[in-house]
Amino acid sequence: MSLEGKTVVLGVTGSIAAYKAPTLARKLQGKGAEVIVVMTDAGTKLVDPLTFRSVIGGPVLVHMFSPSTDWQIEHIALAEKADLFLVAPATANTIGKIASGIADNLLTCAVMATKAPVLIAPAMNVNMYENPVVQANIEKLKGLGYDFVGPKVGTLATGIKGKGPLADVDEIVGKAEELLRGVA
């Protein structure tokens, strides 16, 4: 499927799996999508915004109150521009904030303001992923219409094996295509 004419806002959080997000952005662009990257502060500690600027050939947004040359209210403009809002990787922290309605950074504010489908790709330690609070937050978001892909079972950053690594990039792109089929 072509994503020509579609805009994907890619939210990148502070999971070690953030290193896979530039590849994800490039694959989405390869399918024809316009990709706009929004990063949390923690995400910028793992992958420099310059990496994304180089990969997508456009700006990377991080802070709510960065000077803007076009005088838009950034999180509202992002929310309205998105055909799909994709948070990949999504940490337990960001999932919890979204589930609780906490909008304290550009990424969570834009997610709260969007009418587009939201696809969340969790990536975290198995113990965090299996924590009842995290599972309750995921179930709450699913009940509210949010979509999820992954995580997969694999070797974690700590060297142990379990459910928590980010879904494969191709699986995430496939789920994004599936969700965008219904977007006019």
Image (cartoon, rainbow, N blue to C red):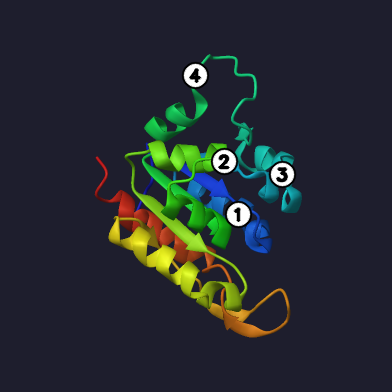
> Residue 55, located in which quarter of the rendered image?
top right
Q: Secondary structure at mark 3?
A: helix
Dots 2, 4 in contact, CB < 8 A: no
Looking at the rendered image, the quarter that the N terminus falls into is bottom left
Q: Is residue 17 above or below residue 112?
A: below
The kind of secondary structure element at disc 2 is strand
Q: CA distance from mark 4 to mark 3?
A: 25 Å
Identify which residue is drawn at 50% across, 51% down: 97
Disc 1 packing (10 Å; few <14; some 14–19; many ≥20): many
User: Front-most of 45 and 180?
Assistant: 45
In the foreground, 110 or 104: 104
Mark 4 lies on residue: 72
- Judged from this view, the residue extending furthest toward the bottom is 161
Residue 123: name its quadrant. Answer: bottom right
Tell me which corner region of the image, top left, top right, bottom left or bottom right, holds residue 164.
bottom right
Spot occupied by residue 128 in the image (x, y as percentages of width and height): 58, 72
Q: Nearer the viewer, mark 2 or mark 4?
A: 4
Which residue is identified by label 3? 51
Residue 34 lies, with reference to residue 19, above or below; the image says above
Q: Are marks 2 and 1 in contact (CB under 8 Å)?
A: yes
Mark 1 is on which residue type? Ala
| Sequence-earlier tag: 4 or 3 | 3
- Amino acid bearing label 3: Thr
The label nearer to you, 4 versus 1, is 4
Q: Is residue 141 left or right of residue 33?
A: left
Rendered-image quadrant of the C terminus: top left
Q: Residues within 10 Å of mark 4 (few under 14, many from 20)?
A: few
